[in-house]
Amino acid sequence: MHTVVLVLVEVLIVMGLSRLAGVAFRWINQPLVIGEIVAGIMLGPSLFGMLAPGLSATLFPPETIPFLNLLSQIGLIFFMFLIGLELNPKYLSGNLEIAILISHVSILVPFCLGTLLASILYPLVSIASIPFTAFALFLGAAMSITAFPVLARIITENNLQRTRLGTLALTCAAVDDVTAWCILAVAIAVARNGSIDQKAILTIIESLAYIGFMFTLGRWFLKRLATYYQRAGRLNQLMMALIYGGVVASALITEFIGIHLIFGAFLLGAVMPKNAGLVRELAVKTEDFVLIFLLPVFFAYSGLRTQIGLINTPEAWGLCGLILAVAIAGKYIGTYVAARVSGINNREASALGWLMNTRGLTELIVLNIGLELKVISPLLFTMLVIMALVTTFMTSPLLELTYPKRLIGYIPVFILPRKINKS
């Protein structure tokens, strides 16, 4: 069968299974993305390749993998642009100081625990050619991630978006996202250069210079674009071409600098003017194609590289359990303690800890970067994928246990001190 035809067949299979698995997980009150990630893993060697190796090799031969990788990278670029677009300054209003304290402690604690864990894992599951510094930085960054888009959906589905808890969680996740991506950028620069040498420092300086450029001249140009949109009243094809071209160009610049494509796309989304009409129309035009067509391909590509069969000894499962315990404890304890110190009551502090423990798709993006750069081995990649799935899966039930829906209508919000209508 012709390679392009086979790739299209693969895409059809991926889309269909992703939808089915997503709906099944929604039925048990889990985020759609959990089902999509599980669908991707099911198509890989962990299930399909084990049950029907011949058919799996026929449907997903090695020559089609580069095509899936290309589609998944395009999907990631535009997904990260959408994440940046969602980072609305309204999340940073109100209790910003509390949010900054909580989010940075919720990053610092798991990052430190992750680097300590790296000293145990490095001699056991690392790749020999990777220096410990890069390995430890990457593992610390992977432990620190909170999935902002998944968190936002969980908050919306639980009708928490106008409560104090929901507002604070979104603010913390927004700050957390920016900080964690900066840490990851440093980890990537070190991984690509082998150590914190002159070249790595130059990469970091160039990255900071580009960020400064985007928040000054880049934002100035985008504001002119927003003004044109207000006059036109809609996003025409020329404006869409300029914006999409800007996303790809920004992604290429950060790749040439030496960090990664996704950072440039995220940065352009972050500096986009948050004109309500512009953001809504741009998201509507972009989101469906990215989430329905491109991201499931990324999940399938990740699933093809996830080999649960590699965890085949009690010692390996023990290490997997240790990774999971460190990930949960670092995020939950860091968030809970910082929230209590900030004067937040016990119930809300605990619920906030479980919300910030959500990793989901964002973690999967980080792990694929690590595997691509050979900072982590296929075995560690699989262990960390399991960690991402478990920490995301546990969020909704633990949130319901800690902060039942019956209480939502009686918790005051930051801005409007009145009961929230559950309808």
Image (cartoon, helix red, strand yellow):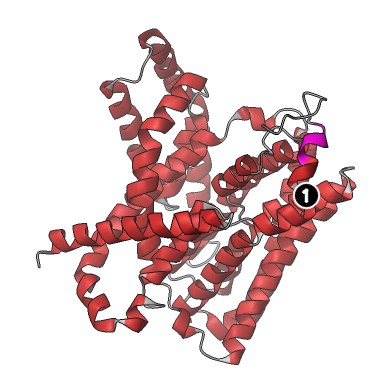
Where in the figure is residue 391, as x and y percent of width and height? 63, 63
Q: Residue at x 47, y 76 (%)?
A: 377
Residue 70: image x %, image y %?
28, 55
The image position of residue 195, as x and y in percent, is 53, 66
In magenta stretch: residue 28: no
Residue holding disc 1: 403
Q: Quadrant of residue 337?
A: bottom right
Q: Residue at x 52, y 79 (%)?
A: 126
Which image quarter holds the C terminus?
top right
Indicate whether 279 appears above or below 68. Answer: above
The tally of labels here is 1
Res. 200 visible in picture: no
Q: Seen in the image, is 66 located left or right of residue 253?
A: left
Magenta highlight: main SS: helix
| Position of 196 relative to 292 (above/below) | below
The N terminus lies in quadrant: bottom left
